[in-house]
Amino acid sequence: MQNEKSPAPYGSVAEQYVIGVDYGTLSGRAVVVRVADGKELGSGVFDYPHAVVTEALPADVAGDGGVRLPADWALQVPNDYRDVLRNAVPAAIADAGIDPAAVIGIATDFTACTMVPVKADGTPLNELPEFANRPHAYVKLWRHHAAQPQADRINTLAAELGESWLPRYGGLISSEWEFAKGLQLLEEDPQAYEAMDHWVEAADWIVWQLSGNYVRNACTAGYKGIYQDGRYPSADFLTALNPAFETFVSDKLEHTIGRLGDAAGYLTAEAAAWTGLPEGIAVAVGNVDAHVTAPAAKAVESGQLVAIMGTSTCHVMNGTELHEVPGMCGVVDGGIVDGLWGYEAGQSGVGDIFGWFTKNGVPPAYHEAAAAAGLGIHEYLTELASRQAIGEHGLIALDWHSGNRSVLVDHELSGVVVGQTLATKPEDTYRALLEATAFGTRTIVDAFRDSGVPVKEFIVAGGLLKNKLLMQIYADATGLQLSTIGSTQGPALGSAIHAAVAAGAYPDIREAAAAMGSEPGEVYVPIPENVAAYEALFQEYRTLHDYFGRGANDVMHRLKAIQRAAKPGLGRHPTEASESDAAERNEKVDA
């Protein structure tokens, strides 16, 4: 490891600080945290200049006439991640007003599964001139769903062969994950696949940029990389998928796996110059935004479900026993903390759905009224919706506008709103969408409970906890008391906790969480009459859920096929797109 430095002895935490950096879908956030008690002293945010690339490669990176992208693609530009270190970290230090010399460690968390194809030295393929205009050379964001055909083949073959790892993922792996995206890269751009030396989770790539060391973290390897019981899927399995995929694990994926909370290495001189931090401080092994939040919420024991609610929602929970849960994203030994099985489930669209509706489904008069009242459009619609009795709008919706991650694991599914009439108002639909995401979480909670993994506590973190109506709907729809995390920067605080352990300030994550974790914020108690009213609506949700999602009516898949055939340019391999197809630039969507 480079720039090694002895970690601080346990207990030497007075006036020492750590940095946690949370890489989200649209921005990166850094927070300065005091090691002694977890107090958050300062923060900084940097918006990715290229946001999420969904229409065409950005001209300032790919050159004139950036290639237009097919449907269901979601890319990012890796240098945006470096810029977070150059901007958000110094801003956080300045905001905290601390001496950077007192910082003893830094840790990062990332969206997952977000993949970067790189050369042996960590250079992303898109930064090579010959690959700058090749879509497969860019970061595939977690919500890149164009690898669904590859995921379907992986699932079918694994079921036919009785692969022992498949039940660890609820019987289905996702198009969002490492193997499906890697197989898509091979089959759609074999030249880029051949040029790639490592297929790297962004969570590990950014640690590589900080420390000079490439270490795969145990969390993404287990949940997104099909790494179970010390091994990946076999070469025989990969060959059956595609003979050219036989060496995917050995040549592109396999690498040293680091334990969560360990130091992956120490800050290089280059990264020290970016961040303004001391060279040689500990850089923690990478992690996922959802999973690091559990220690921030002091949820490190069995049965404590943490829902990290933002553009999407990830549900994580520890358990003492291994169980097979249909449609879960995964269960990994030590996936959150050592000594317990870490369970994960999720919803691919939550805040994204609300943001889409306010951008595309709300007339100008509502935006004008919100502005006149001094409210944001979300606040205004929430206020209107909160005046309604449960069921008053006469609607039921399915929250699949970005596909279904759990429990159906199918990103070809799409959103539905049933019951609209000429009297339906925007606040009606808005509330129905809030309720639909709550019913999606209820479906996940029920799946855990029915599989022997009961949810004893329900804790919410993330940006959406500020919506009090939404929080009460979740409590009523699930029938669970809901508490919110006191910190507004849960993932960044969780990363800071890991940084403290990596730096030697605490012996393990449990002790660090006890000292540095956030106290609860607000508590929402289920209202009995609301629980009963939502139970009736949930039964309707479940009927639609099974009708459209379990094969009774395959219309959503058929519509996807029709869309790809009918929309110009979207059914074509991206590397075949002509320059004349690529006039549009990606526009940042604020969800």
Image (tube, helix red, strand yellow):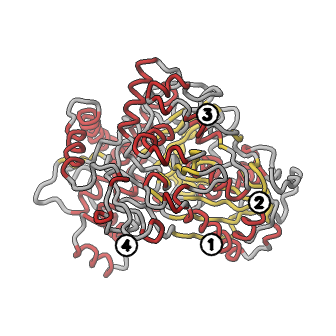
Kind of residue at badge 1? Asn
Crowding around mark 4 (Cα neighbors within 10 Å: few <14, some 14 to 19, many 20+) is some
**Residue that badge 2 annotates:** 267
Q: Assign a secondary structure to mark 2.
A: loop
Image height of 182 relative to 424, above or below: above
Q: Mark 2 or mark 4: which is in front?
A: 2
Separation (CA) of disc 1 from disc 2: 17 Å
The spot of residue 296 in percent (x, y) is: 64, 52
Q: Mark 2 or mark 3: which is in front?
A: 3
Kind of residue at badge 2? Leu
Looking at the image, do the residues carrying marks 2 and 3 touch, with CB atoms under 8 Å apart?
no
Residue 376: which numbered mark, if any?
4
Crowding around mark 2 (Cα neighbors within 10 Å: few <14, some 14 to 19, many 20+) is many
Q: Left or right of 486: which side holds 350?
A: left
Q: Mark 4 or mark 3: which is in front?
A: 3
Q: Assign a secondary structure to mark 1.
A: helix
